[in-house]
Amino acid sequence: MLASVDWHVVWVRVAHPDHAFFIALTRTVYIAVIAQIMGVILGLLAALMRMSKLRILRVLSGIYVWIFRGTPLLVQIFFVYLASNQLLGFTLIPNSLNGGFFKLDGAIFAGILALGVNEGAYMREIVRAGIDSIDKGQMEAATSLGMRYGLAMRRIVLPQAARVIIPPLGNEFNNMLKNTSLLFTIGVYEMFADAEIGYSNSFQPTEYFLGVAFWYLVLTTVWTFIQAGIERKLAASERGEELSFRERWQAAWNPARGGIFMRSPSR
Amino acid sequence: MQAEDVHKRFGRLEVLKGVSLTVTKGETVCIIGPSGSGKTTFIRCVNHLEKIDSGRIQVNGHLIGYRENNGKLVEDNERNIARQRTEIGMVFQRFNLFPHKTALENVVEAPIKVLGRPKDQAIPHGKALLERVGLGDKLDTYPGKLSGGQQQRVAIARSLAMGPALMLFDEPTSALDPEVTGEVLSVMEELAAAGITMIVVTHEMGFARKAANRVVMMDDGLIIEEGTPQHFFDEPAHERTKQFLSKIL
């Protein structure tokens, strides 16, 4: 019954969360960001491998996608955290990682790794679609000027493919923000873990899960605005406003030059 | 440029059935012929955008795309092919300018990144080339804002920036509106007059008549007739050439 919900607790979870919650929120965000960056890099590598002349690289890329898209993310997370050391015969996942100025819990490290590797399999398809969308004549023009394949990819094809890749990449990151909640199952203290622990102490499921749902919504909504801003800037240049790719990126991120929430300059 | 008995097939279709052609330094040669005759495929073979099945192509005395190994031809490695291509300029039917770079950036990209020219040399040279093709006022314009004729002239400047020994033109005006073909052709005539070695696949007979030293007629994967423009337009020998010319003139 609605009446039995303690709305004061919901309000506190939404408006005045405690310090532990903010640590959990920060953790959710940085796990998502690092795992997404890893996913993009792995996806790019796998996409390039898939287009390689060497059959072995194409096969490896195919196996990678086959396995990581074909098994549940939750299974992969458990596998990386609990089974990978035993399987590999060396310590891939340490109890804790100490890099001098930062310390990372082994579970967080495993979680980032699992989310990132899983994401790479999905990003491969997105990167490939982006590269495929670039006219073959671009690569021909570049190589006929004497550019080698790698240089032509880096300077000519990928910068153009990036425009095609960015919208679906944004959607992937939205998913990533939410998928971090799965890491609760291997003991990472992120946003969902915070709510779950609060619930088990208080037996107030509605209050705690409503509260955390609100905060996930905040994260994904903020991201939606950022994404829309970036896409609008990219679209503006497609309409022929004369900004270089670098200038557009700078404008997209730099508030002093328009920022993402400003309209693109009319001329 | 020297091509000997070049054969090329796409699957079961034989597109080049033994093409031999020699172009000497400073010469302008136009290749004409009906579509499907293999002219475009042939010049794409000259800078190894297409592999050949047999025969040999040499530019400046270097074998293109292949290297000789115990009398057999094996495909060369990517590094050597790329180096050979720096000596061969290519202008495409559909321009293929880099849309994310300005006209000047298009021109200086390869000299800086491939030849390793310092920027303070490459940029003035690039500007001079764009001026030469009449686009000195469009240096910072993106291809999307240029007309087809202007884009093709940028593409010509981009190829010239590498200082090629040979320029290949693959139907450079057939994607253009009739009213702008003239501006591209006059640039090409100027290049021909300046003594740049050129092979031009074209349907522009006016250009062939004015600028070419030699005209080559291809049909069905073979060169069927070869001669001066004079010879071609006044007294073509081959029946197929007469038919073709009567259709397009």
Image (cartoon, coloured by chain):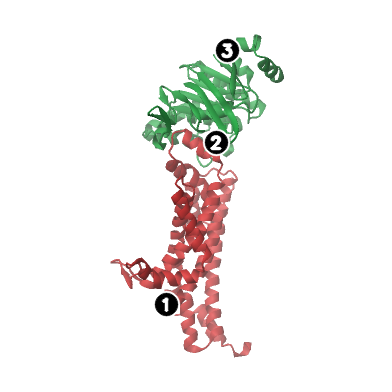
Chain colours: A red, B green
Q: Residue at x 40, y 25 (%)?
A: B62
Label 1 secondary element = loop
Q: Look at mark 3 in the image and give the residue it sits on.
A: B227
Q: Which residue is mark 1?
A: A187
Residue B153 in sight in this render:
no
Q: Which residue is mark 2?
A: B96
Query: Few, some or many C-alpha atoms within 10 Å of disc 1 (few <14, some 14-19, many ≥20)?
Result: some
Q: CA distance from mark 3 to mark 2?
A: 32 Å
Q: CA distance from mark 1 to mark 3?
A: 82 Å
Foreground tag (3 vs 2): 3
- Badge 2 amino acid: Asn
- Quick check: marks 1 and 3 in contact, CB under 8 Å? no
Residue B120 at x, y = what percent? 37, 33
Label 3, residues with CA under 10 Å away: few <14, some 14-19, many ≥20: some
Q: Residue at x 52, y 33 (%)?
A: B50
Mark 2 crowdedness (10 Å alpha carbons): few <14, some 14-19, many ≥20: many
User: In the rendered image of this protein, does residue B105 appear above or below residue B129?
Assistant: below
**Mark 2 residue element:** loop
Q: Position of residue B86 (x, y in %)?
A: 43, 30
